[in-house]
Amino acid sequence: MKMGGTDSKAMESGYEEMMKELYDMAAAATINAYAPFSGFRVGAALLADSGKVYTGVNVENSSYGASICAERTALVKAVSEGERRFTAIAIAAVADGPVESLPCGICRQFMYEFSPEIYIITGTDRERLNVQSLKELLPLGFALDAAGR
Ligand code: THU
């Protein structure tokens, strides 16, 4: 497993299997993606601090701008069940075949609201996953409190 930033042996050993399982759940979820317009099917599996996993898929709409990404679907499901803190999110995508897909900017900001240091797991193969912290992908996200409200 390739980790962004500083390598952490503890992360490698303690969480590697959990990350693979989370990725498997994201990949399994892609079957439920509703992507008739792009043909780009995305699945996400979000691990909450409670230990529960919430999956999500992209849900497109004839009015394209009304579409929602897989990551935000998972977050909205989890937050609406009372979750507020998250450890990791795995993302799997299928176009013609499996493709690596990083979260879009809106999804990064959406995650930042709840867990600015969440781990983001991507890849096309459970044996070769890439793990990066949201801190790396969105180092300076927006927070209303920090803006001096
Ligand atoms: N998509 C996601 O589900 N997550 C992302 O982070 C990027 C894009 C979806 C939105 C749309 O349904 C399709 O991928 C093509 O953009």
Image (cartoon, rainbow, N blue to C red):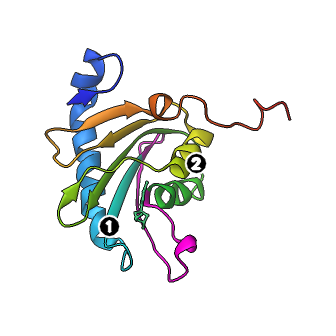
Q: Which part of the image, by quadrant, shows the C terminus?
A: top right
Using the rendered view, name the quadrant where residue 81 is placed: bottom right
> Which label sits on residue 85?
none
Q: Is residue 43 above or below residue 129?
A: below
Q: Residue furthest right?
A: 149
- Describe the element under mark 1 as helix, strand or loop: loop
Can you tell which of label 2 and label 1 is closer to the viewer?
Answer: 1
Q: Amino acid at mark 1?
A: Phe
Which residue is located at x 23 percent, y 52 percent?
24
x, y (%) of residue 4? 33, 26
Which residue is located at x 29 percent, y 47 percent?
22
Q: Earlier in the sequence, mark 2 or mark 1?
A: 1
Relative horizontal placement of residue 119, taking residue 81 as reference (left or right): left
Q: Nearer the viewer, residue 29 or 53?
A: 29
Q: Magenta stretch: give its range.
A: 47-70
Label 1 neighbour load within 10 Å: few <14, some 14-19, many 20+? some
Q: Which part of the image, by quadrant, shows the N terminus?
A: top left
Q: Which residue is mark 2?
A: 110
Q: Nearer the viewer, residue 4 or 19?
A: 4
Residue 52 is covered by the magenta coloring: yes
> Which label sits on residue 40?
1
